[in-house]
Image (cartoon, rainbow, N blue to C red):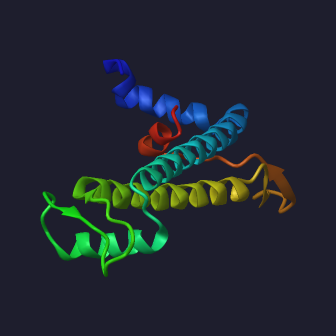
């Protein structure tokens, strides 16, 4: 980012740009694009989890047991085997288990972001009603959407 783009004048101008009626469409498109990006990230992460689980032959039951073992020990320098004499004898490095846990947490976080962005999209009005102060008549106008700098950055503006 150039220095001018970080200045308060540029930021204020950018917010005004987003609030214009022409840009409401761009705001809606930016939100839809963000949803698509998040869905793609979730699918990518789920693919990585699936590959890791296949590589180390980790089914759901074994994963639960390994995560419990990992969380009960505070060391990341250990490898884990399946519990209770199960048929799987492969050793799973602690880093793999930590990776599975962090990827799952990231998936949950990104799904939460998807839900929030979709909620904003559903509730983003195209028009709002108001009472004209002089006549009392009910009129329609385009709503002004004020976004913070963080929201603009999140949406890629």
In the image, is residue 9 above or below residue 50? above
In the image, is residue 8 above or below residue 101? above
Pinpoint residue 126: horizontal percent, then vertical percent.
78, 49
In the image, is residue 28 above or below residue 3? below
Horizontal arrangement in the rendering, residue 16 relative to residue 66 (left or right): right
Q: How many labels does the image show?
A: 0
Pinpoint residue 104: horizontal percent, then vertical percent.
43, 60
Horizontal arrangement in the rendering, residue 141 relative to residue 111 (left or right): right
Q: Quadrant of the N terminus?
A: top left
Rendering quarter of residue 123: bottom right
Please report the residue visible at 63 percent of the width from the left and 56 percent of the height from the top. 120
In the image, is residue 23 above or below residue 36? above
Horizontal arrangement in the rendering, residue 44 relative to residue 106 (left or right): right
Please report the residue visible at 63 percent of the width from the left and 42 percent of the height from the top. 36
Please report the residue visible at 59 percent of the width from the left and 31 percent of the height from the top. 17
Horizontal arrangement in the rendering, residue 131 relative to residue 4 (left or right): right
Please report the residue visible at 35 percent of the width from the left and 75 percent of the height from the top. 65
51 vs 144, nearest the viewer: 51
Pinpoint residue 135: horizontal percent, then vertical percent.
84, 58
76 vs 142, nearest the viewer: 76
Q: Please, which residue is most extreme toward the bottom here?
A: 84
């Amino acid at each position: 980012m150039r220095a001018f783009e970080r200045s308060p004048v540029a930021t204020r101008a950018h917010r005004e740009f987003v609030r214009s009626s022409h840009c409401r469409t761009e705001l809606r498109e930016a939100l839809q694009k963000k949803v698509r990006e998040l869905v793609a990230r979730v699918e990518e992460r789920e693919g990585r989890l699936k590959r890791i689980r296949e590589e180390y032959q980790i089914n759901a039951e074994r994963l639960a047991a390994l995560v419990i073992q990992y969380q009960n020990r505070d060391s990341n320098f250990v490898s884990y085997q399946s519990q209770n004499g199960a048929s799987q004898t492969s050793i799973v490095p602690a880093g793999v288990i930590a990776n599975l846990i962090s990827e799952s947490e990231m998936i949950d976080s990104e799904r939460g972001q998807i839900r929030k962005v979709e909620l904003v999209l559903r509730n983003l009005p195209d028009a709002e009603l108001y009472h004209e102060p002089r006549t009392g008549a009910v009129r329609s106008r385009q709503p002004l959407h004020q976004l913070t700098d963080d929201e603009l950055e999140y949406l890629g503006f």
